[in-house]
Image (cartoon, rainbow, N blue to C red):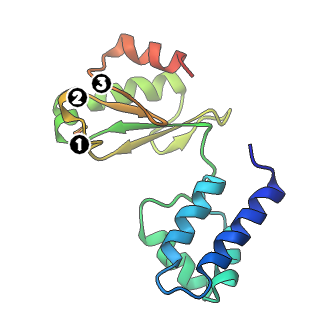
């Protein structure tokens, strides 16, 4: 795991890589989020400073796109698919079961910072509906019993 200083150094390298490139703001924000897990106010100020743009521009772009987060995420990110195929196959029920077992509402992170539960659009494997991804692991054809088993894997 990266220390705080290592992360700052990496962010510095990312900023210098994109410093004089047009269209660099979104890739920098993506990389910064990849590094820290989310975009804090402090990180957005550093990005603004590093790229020589106004903080309001950075904030405006970051808040326009749903891919960016503004609060810390859990160690594992659960993406519960709510695309059409998953919706008709019981995604709502699966997400509710997960939320109840974790004690957290969709879009939130557990108090122990272990899991973040998100509702997402189609994950691209509709034939396995209902589908959930935990980090990069895909779980399909879910039912209540498997939800418990899956959470136990982490
Ligand atoms: S709708 Fe869920 S994977 Fe496509």
The reply to whether the residue tagged 2 has its Cβ within 8 angstroms of ligand 1 is yes
Nearer-N-terminus badge (2/3):
2
Camera-side residue: 141 or 10?
10
Tell me the number on the disc at residue 129.
2
Point out the image quarter for the N terminus.
top right
Camera-side residue: 113 or 150?
150
The reply to whether the residue tagged 1 has its Cβ within 8 angstroms of ligand 1 is yes
Q: Is residue 72 visible?
A: yes
The residue that label 1 is drawn on is 83
Answer whether labels 2 and 1 touch (C-beta < 8 Å).
yes
Nearer-N-terminus badge (2/1):
1
How far apart in space, not on screen, are marks 3 and 1 (Cα)?
Answer: 13 Å
Structural crowding at the residue carrying mark 3, measured as other residues with C-alpha within 10 Å and reported as few (<14), some (14–19) or many (≥20): some
The residue that label 3 is drawn on is 140
Structural crowding at the residue carrying mark 1, measured as other residues with C-alpha within 10 Å and reported as few (<14), some (14–19) or many (≥20): many
Question: Residue 65: x, y in percent?
Answer: 42, 67
Answer whether labels 2 and 3 touch (C-beta < 8 Å).
yes
How far apart in space, not on screen, are marks 2 and 3 (Cα)?
Answer: 6 Å
**Relative vertical location of residue 85 with respect to residue 32 in this rendering, above or below:** above
Q: Is residue 44 visible?
A: no
| Quarter location, residue 139 | top left
Which secondary structure, mark 3? loop
Tell me the number on the disc at residue 45.
none
């Amino acid at each position: 795991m990266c220390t705080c200083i290592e992360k700052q150094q990496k962010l510095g390298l990312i900023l210098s890589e994109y410093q004089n490139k047009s269209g660099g703001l979104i890739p920098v924000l993506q990389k910064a989020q990849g590094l820290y897990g989310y975009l804090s106010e402090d990180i957005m100020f550093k990005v603004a400073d590093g790229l020589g743009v106004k903080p309001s521009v950075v904030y405006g772009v970051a808040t326009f796109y749903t891919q960016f987060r503004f609060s810390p995420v859990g160690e594992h990110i659960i993406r519960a698919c709510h695309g059409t195929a998953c919706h008709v196959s019981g995604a709502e029920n699966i997400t509710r079961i997960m939320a109840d077992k974790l004690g957290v509402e969709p879009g939130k992170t557990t108090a122990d910072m272990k899991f973040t539960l998100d509702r997402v659009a189609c994950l691209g494997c509709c034939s396995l509906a209902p589908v959930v991804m935990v980090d990069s692991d895909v779980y399909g054809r879910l039912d209540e019993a498997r939800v418990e088993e899956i959470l136990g894997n982490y």
